[in-house]
Image (cartoon, rainbow, N blue to C red):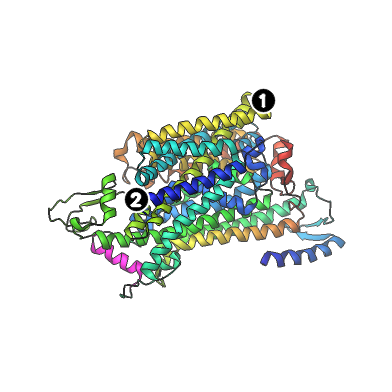
Amino acid sequence: MYTGIASWSLRELGAVALATNVTIFTKRGTEQAIDWRPGVTDMDSGGKQRAYWRKNLHYLVILLGIWALVSFGFSILFVDELDQISVGGFRLGFWFAQQGSIYVFVIVIFIYVALMNRLDRRYDVDDRDGSGP
Amino acid sequence: MSVQAWTFVMVGLSFALYIGVAILSKATSTSEFYVAGGRVSSVVNGMATAAGWMSAASFISMAGLISFMGRDGSVYLMGWTGGYVLLALLLAPYLRKFGKYTVPDFVGDRYYSQLARVVSVICAIFVSFTYVAGQMRGVGIVFSRFLDVGINTGVIIGMGIVFFYAVLGGMRGITYTQVAQYCVLIFAYLVPAIFISLMMTDHLIPQIGLGATLNDGSGQHLLEKLDSLSQELGFAAYTSGQKGTLDVLLITAALMVGTAGLPHVIVRFYTVTKVSAARSSAGWALVFIALLYTAAPAVAAFARTNLLTTISNAAYAEAPAWFKKWEDTGLITFDDKNQDGIIQYVGTKAAMENELTIDRDIMVLANPEIANLPNWVTGLVAAGGLAAALSTAAALLLVISTSVAHDLLKKWLRPNITEKAELFAARITAGIAVCIAGYFGINPPGFVAEVVAFAFGLAAASFFPVIILGIFSRRMNKYGAITGMIVGITFTAGYIIYFKFVHPELNSADHWLFGVSPEGIGTLGMVLNFAVSIAISQATAPPPLQVQQLVESIRIPRGAGTSYTNN
């Protein structure tokens, strides 16, 4: 599966990262050295956490944009325009309103899950010992 | 075997299954009672969430509503699924990291205020009670129609079952019973859908059958046929919309945001093992919900086509058996206005007068009979309807009992209460709540549908902004949050009460504010809440340092796995 491949390649990346400190470019254009060594999980160091959070917000804006485009856009605001196009026995706008939007919702969530699992590992904040109390 | 015998068999088997599961998963601690110990796997939790979410409204009413509304029915389809995107992306992972047991827990701690906690407890209890009354009513209808036991007896049997596994098992019992109930309800929904899809279009998958050509030799697409059939009879074309665009948009948004703000949905994400599981669990929940929700429009279109072809212009004396049976319940009424013995079922644009009124709620229940499916399918649908109603009722009762035992007693009135006493209080409250819900089931307030719209509007205008701002803004303080909640609730509740209860005769587009119906007003309430919260919060002192640190900490997944040992 996709996540399997991703985790494998990230482990490779992690091995490289362990040997040295990795430089991250933040949006403000400054460089921040990030300590990737295991055991360094002190979140108060700030920079790493801010970078993680900013990346998360970046994903949220894009994915919620897709969510809104498909539901409020394709299915409501532009439904009549899309209805001019027929796909199989469906008018496209009607299909989005009653079928397609729901499929897109599911896909959006699983893309976010995959992106965040990767991001959690990359920033070493994943909840590894999560087997519960 | 007759329909009734099959219904007894199906309902009896499914009830035996739920009780067996409940006995195997009894709760022994408050953490198990409230959140199943935080040990539920992501797929299991997704399935339980789906069962708890899909109520009698989804199972019994929704396809019927779509059937009569055509394309506008998409407000329910998208509104009741799109909220899961918000849950997965904006709420679930952070609330899971926060740990604890309830939404008021989060509001109380994040806004360092007992007042905020109490306001949100009251909202949670109100929302849950309005919802649960509707479920009990659904139970009663299924029992009375299919088992001939009378609505009151039906409600009491349903109460007994819910009482047994919610009070005994708490969240742990509910979780595993809901998995069983999901299996029953999805099977019961899809079997007739697949049957009818095969009969009408030769396609096994109803979602594909909806867009396929009919197998009656005409070569016409199902939806084309339905459009032309509807227009011939003076109805609007099925695939066209009748509601105003803005109203559709705001209703959809209110239902989405309301879904993401409903306490019995949110609390499910406290039960998984870790933050990443909370995200994927919301995804799984939506997969399981989508199985039913994408089949529903197909069921709606099939049922509508069948209804129009079999009933319209048929001779009353030759009407099928199911028609007479539902006529007895008063849910179908025929008034032969022109005395010709023919059923004229026509829309407002037709030259003739309409003679038939059909209650939308019967479409799913009558569908197997309309399509001439075997009797066991009808029994299965009855069991599925009960599974949907009971699983939602149990989830809501748990929210009520947790709110009282945990949020009111433990966190406010009696902080020194022992765990054993708290668990006892939770069970007693669940018991009392079942009885109150049962009372409303037997004596329904007469406006259940309106009240459910109320629940969504209030959840959208109160919880959602408070939780979102609590996670995404470090600056948000208690003054902003409390004022925002109160303004949001007052505005939304005031608008709905005015048009639904005080002046129902004014409830039309001409009198609405900006043309927004009471169903969609929760969206404006939410916007108002956001605006007021942010403005007030900017003008007052920032929250204390430890609260700002709490916000930092819930944004980082690591460490959620151990949260319940710290309580």
Instruction: Left or right? Give the position of B312 relative to A7.
Output: left
Q: Residue at x 44, y 38 (%)?
A: B157
Query: Percent position (x, y) of residue B115?
Result: 59, 29
Q: Is B225 inside the magenta-drawn segment?
A: yes
Q: Seen in the image, is B62 located left or right of residue B321?
A: right
Vertical placement of residue B488 versus A107, above or below: above
Residue B305 locus on image (x, y percent): 31, 62
Instruction: Give the chain letter at badge 2.
Output: B
Please identify the residue farthest to the left as the structure is shown: B339
- Quarter placement of the N terminus of chain B: bottom left
Q: Which residue is mark 1?
A: B417
Is residue B235 a member of the stretch shown in magenta? no
Residue of label 2: B362
Q: Which subunit holds the residue at mark 1?
A: B
Q: Position of residue A62 (x, y in %)?
A: 59, 59
Q: Which residues are magenta?
A: B220-234
